[in-house]
Image: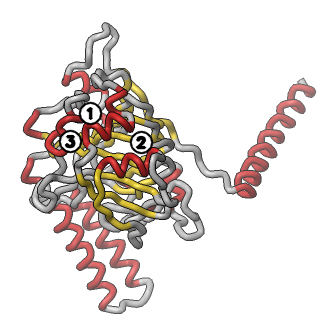
Amino acid sequence: DGARRALRVLLAAARVVTSHMSEVVAEMYAIAPTPSIVRRVHAKGDGGAALAPAEFERLVLSRKMPVVVEGWDLGVDQEQWEPAGLKAACGEKRVSVHVSSCADLAWVPEKNFAFEFMPFSELVDRIWGAAPGEGKYLYLRSVGEKMRTRPADFAESFPDLARTIHLPMPFAHEALFSTALRVSSAGLTLWTHNDMMENLLVQVVGTKEVTLWPPSDAPNLYVEGSSSPCTPSSDLDQYPRLAAANGRSMRAYLRPGDVLYIPPLWYHHVRSLEASVSVNVFWRGLAPDAYARKDLYGNRDLPAGEKALELARSAGRAVREAQLPEPYASFYAERVTAELERALRL
């Protein structure tokens, strides 16, 4: 018995030492938390039949969590989406392209790219190497034919290419908001942002890495509007709260044929591991009048939310302009927060 007790003491001591050493090693090497992997489901049920809308609602939409759906019957003829096929279907179409010397496109705190108009065939040649890239990274996010008044419509802008794919639309047709074609250089990353709409990202060519954070991490991502200056690997000395957000992040790796469901409000950062082509399907999960009327990209704050945010900013200004010293300033800031939570019954 004495030997067993001694052994238990030694084991307990070893656990303490091991735990402490793990913390020391993590601190020495700044080991970041590993994102959890996004759940995958198959587009066909156990019996081999495609998921009915009700089943898709239950397995995917109802949880409001990111999900990768694999095995969706997209009807893609892969040759049509290779460089030669893309040029044959869309070659002379003129498109507005993000062009940057930096692989990490940024919107905030400062835009680091310019827009260039070019034929679609030039975009393809510069991304897939048939023309000099000049050290530039290119990214197309298609817009509406009347870009100032209408959201993107993939079938209207690229009809020949649109006929070669069956986009998933597991919702009522009247809820459809927009469909957008995306083409990007290998290694390019798109700044972290969120959308108000329900979103399916359909990966057609190449592979992507998508990092996602829940809406509650907006303060930890230093969000400005719908965008964040943070990436998963941003400097934690500059953005210390990002460490907490990264501890709750999720990651998805997309292959051709994968469809990623991105719930409304979830922040996402997308990296093209290879030259990539994908299509977004955005739809409204709320009544149409809940959204901003002139929102062409699906990322403007809801009018009700915009009003609430302005009231919050007004409250902050009132406390700041009064130049209250501490602890009064913090006291009223906490009171305002508590009143808001009480009003919303959180």
Quarter occupied by the N terminus? top right
Q: Which residue is mark 3?
A: 158
Query: Earlier along the polypeptide chain: callout 1 or callout 2?
Result: 1
Crowd around label 2: few <14 · some 14–19 · many ≥20 (10 Å): many
Q: Establish if 330 lies above or below 133.
A: below
Residue 102: give x, y in percent of width and height. Answer: 49, 63
Instruction: Tell me whether the residue at label 2 lies in contact with that at label 3, contact meaning CB atoms closer than 8 angstroms.
Output: no
The residue where tag 1 is placed is 62
Q: Nearer the viewer, mark 3 or mark 1?
A: 3
Amino acid type at circle 1 is Ser
Give the percent coordinates (x, y) of residue 253: 47, 36
The residue that disc 2 covers is 276
Q: Left or right: 199 with respect to 236? A: left
Q: Secondary structure at mark 1?
A: helix
Question: 295 or 148: which is nearer to us?
Answer: 148
Q: Secondary structure at mark 3?
A: loop
**Outermost residue toward the top?**
47
